[in-house]
Image: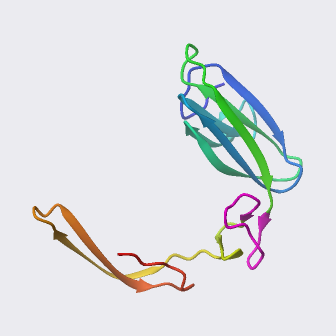
Amino acid sequence: MKASCGGDGVEQVYGYIATDTGVLAVRVDSEGPLYVSVRRTCTDASSEVLCVAKNLNHDVSVTTGELVYIIVDSDTAASPATYTLSAKLLPVRSLGESCDPLREDDRCDAGLRCSMSVCVANSAPSISSAQALKTGRHGNDLYVSLSGSDAEGDAESSL
């Protein structure tokens, strides 16, 4: 068994059964080379829903009773990695529901984001014009000016 993103070392496989429907927040911290894969079926590479090299801090949607597999693989058999793995099931909040802005206790549903501790629509600002100007002594700096609108009125501007 090998993660699609790499790793030729000895794999360690962890199974997780979801006790509720939500988001499984998977976190892996490591100092050395590491590859982490999450699969819905352990031996089926095509069921892989996530694969990253090195440290991982990603979410995987799960349903009650679903078994997912977290596969941790080092770079080579000669260099096994030392790592810390954690997995936490988080509830998913709907539009208008309270949420944790630090994303430690829950997540907002797809297409939403947590703003001021409430799940709100996550629409991008609309850019109507852009200008770029080379500046600096040798023209190595670039100044960019954007104009547009923000439906939620929550985009910040900075200079």
Q: Which is more toward the observer, 119 or 141?
A: 141
On the picture, is 34 further left or further right than 85? Answer: left
Query: Residue 13: image x %, image y %?
Result: 74, 28
Quadrant position of residue 48: top right
Chief secondary structure of the magenta portion: loop
Whether the magenta-drawn stretch holds residue 100 is answered as: yes
Instruction: Provide residue 145's location: percent of width, then percent of height.
Output: 30, 78
Residue at 67% in and 43% down: 27
Q: Residue furthest left?
A: 138
Q: What's the magenta region?
A: 92-107
Report the front residue among 111 and 150: 150
Vertical position of residue 99 compared to residue 140: above or below = below
Q: Quadrant of the C terminus?
A: bottom left
* Front position in the image: 84 or 5: 84
Q: Residue at x 78, y 76 (%)?
A: 97
Identify the residue at image location x=60%, y=74%: 122
Question: Is 51 positioned to the left or the right of 108 in the image?
Answer: left
| Horizontal arrangement in the rendering, residue 126 relative to residue 123 (left or right) | left
Compared with residue 121, is residue 109 higher up or lower down, i.e. above or below? Answer: above
Q: How many marks?
A: 0
